[in-house]
Image (cartoon, rainbow, N blue to C red):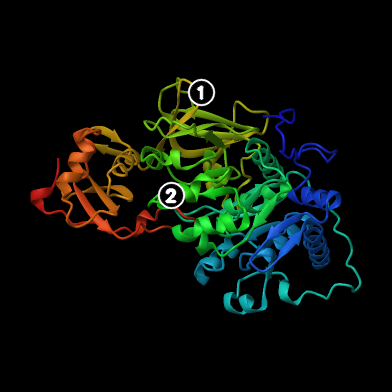
Amino acid sequence: MTGAHRSDGVHHPDDGGLPAAGARTPVDDILAHATRDPGAIAVVTPESELSYGELAARIERLARILTARGVGPEEVCAVAVERGVDAVVAMAAVLRAGGAFLTLDVELPVPRLVSMAESGQARFLLTTTALAERLALPVTGPTLLLDRLPAPGGPAPAAPPYTAGPRSLAYISHTSGSTGAPHAVMIERAGLDAYLRFVVRDYGLGPHTVAVQLAPLGYDASIRDIFAPLVAGGRLVLVERARLLRADTFAAVLQEYGADTVLSTTPSLLTFLAQGPDAAERLGGVRTVVSSGESLRPFLAAGGRALVGGLLVNQYGPTECTMTSTRYKVPAVPDTSADVIGTPIDGVTVQVLDDELRAVPDGAVGELYIGGGGVARGYRGLAALTAGRFLPDPSGPPGARMYRTGDLTRRLPGGELEYLGRSDRQIKIRGHRVDPAEIEGALLTHPHITGAVVTAETDGQGRTWLYAHVTGLSAGTRDASVRAHLAATLPPHMLPRRFTRIDRLPVTRSGKTDRGTLGRPSVPAAERVS
């Protein structure tokens, strides 16, 4: 995709005489929309609507205050507020002032937030009076209380100098911790700008777009949720997140606000929303659904694609590479035999390499390395870890680096990448490599199973066996009948030995299945497998 690609109704943010890509931020587009059509609605909440003109004025005012307090390039500002308009204004104003934001999910435990503020090396804090007292976050510089800003109409602070360049920090985001302790990742302005503009172009966003913010603050997906629709000139809908996580109110929210775009969901949530007789109503009218964070294969194997009436995109990308590195637009009749993550987005390169960093032939399995403009600067305050994960890219220009993902992939005949799981989480059963997502997808085809997670366990003799947690299955349904159902499509070594029935799969704050909280079984000697 380039700026020459056109389709009716799509906003093209690379037009209009703005500075070259990387020298600008999403705020430039918000201000441009405010100039062209100040009365157009930018943000909608249950209480009010905010026009682009009003949003731009609030951003400019707060940016001037931040500049007067000392915010500028490379200065990190922690943003600790409830989800809502204040969060949008604060993030944008920090960018406008030349700084970098670190958004925090204030519903997380306080010790976790303290750790994030410390590892992100935040100097400034934007919060409210009540939250400042409750959180007591450690910052070395000023705390700005958003509910006690100077009244409008007084002497205007000096305008921000706007000296931040494309290599300046844009935001700090922490890794999820699913593969180890969370680390503070430094993303630069050029990567953020290029990525958001790609999303607008590739997914056909424009003034017609009405998108809901689903991802919680503090997770990088929320940055896409918030800024992509605003870069496109569309509407951003901010409602209580719990309403979007309940099957009975999800469709009601979309209908109430005319929302047609979900830019950050997870396969776990899609699978949950796909249950019951009203599933087609919940997802059928959505124009664009973007999924990431987990394997989409189980959802597709269970027939989920037919429930999404519009565009369904499977995104892949680590936090270390500006949210998304590859994407796959799922066809109406998908191939469910592989977990396809597609091709690189604009400005990103991908290589499938062996242990000696040599390219493997197409079809062969290797580790995925990501290069290009979206690669992060590294981990804040962790030079050794950065050096071990961000390596020189021999195929790029001088000074280019590539990120070692730890994910196994292979290139399919059509050029798309197939995701094969973590290199450090491969399951071997009797010499066979097993993909849990394939088994989970087969479980979801059972008429009574509504959710499934498959894990590997080891008995006292070091032998590996499969364990399944399932939802929707009654106690009266025998495990043997479930295995018989699976045996119709799976070989014997892929059949779980144990099944545990639970009411609902646990999920993390970001919406991924929380495998770490699932109980581990004890295996009687008579049932241990070889």
Could you classify mark 2 by the number of other residues whose Cα lies within 10 Å: few (under 14), some (14-19), or many (20 or more)? many
Q: Is residue 407 left or right of residue 256?
A: left
Q: Mark 2 or mark 1: which comes first in sequence? A: 2
Please tell me the numbered disc located at residue 279: 2
> Which amino acid does the dot numbered 1 rest on?
Gly
Q: Residue at x 48, y 32 (%)?
A: 332
Label 1 Cα neighbours within 10 Å, binned few <14 / some 14-19 / many ≥20: few
| 528 vs 392, nearest the viewer | 528
Of circles 2 and 1, the one toward us is 2
- State the residue at coordinates (48%, 49%): 281
| Secondary element type, mark 2 | helix
Outermost left residue: 526
Left or right, 145 with respect to 496, comes to: right
What x and y, as percent, mark residue 329?
A: 53, 34
The location of residue 36, given as percent across then percent down, is 85, 48
The kind of residue tagged 2 is Ala
Q: Is residue 341 visible?
A: yes
Image coords of residue 203 (percent x, y)? 62, 38
Residue at numbered disc 1: 415
Identify whether 429 is placed above or below 142: above
Q: Are marks 2 and 1 in contact (CB under 8 Å)?
A: no
Whether residue 381 is visible to the viewer of this picture, yes or no, is: no
Q: Residue furthest right?
A: 155
- Answer with the quarter of the image where residue 344 lies: top right
The total number of labels drawn is 2
Nearer to the camera, 515 or 506: 506
Residue situated in front as seen by the camera: 511 or 525: 511
Q: Quadrant of the C terminus?
A: top left
Dividing the picture into quadrants, the one containing residue 76 is bottom right
Query: Element under label 1?
Result: loop
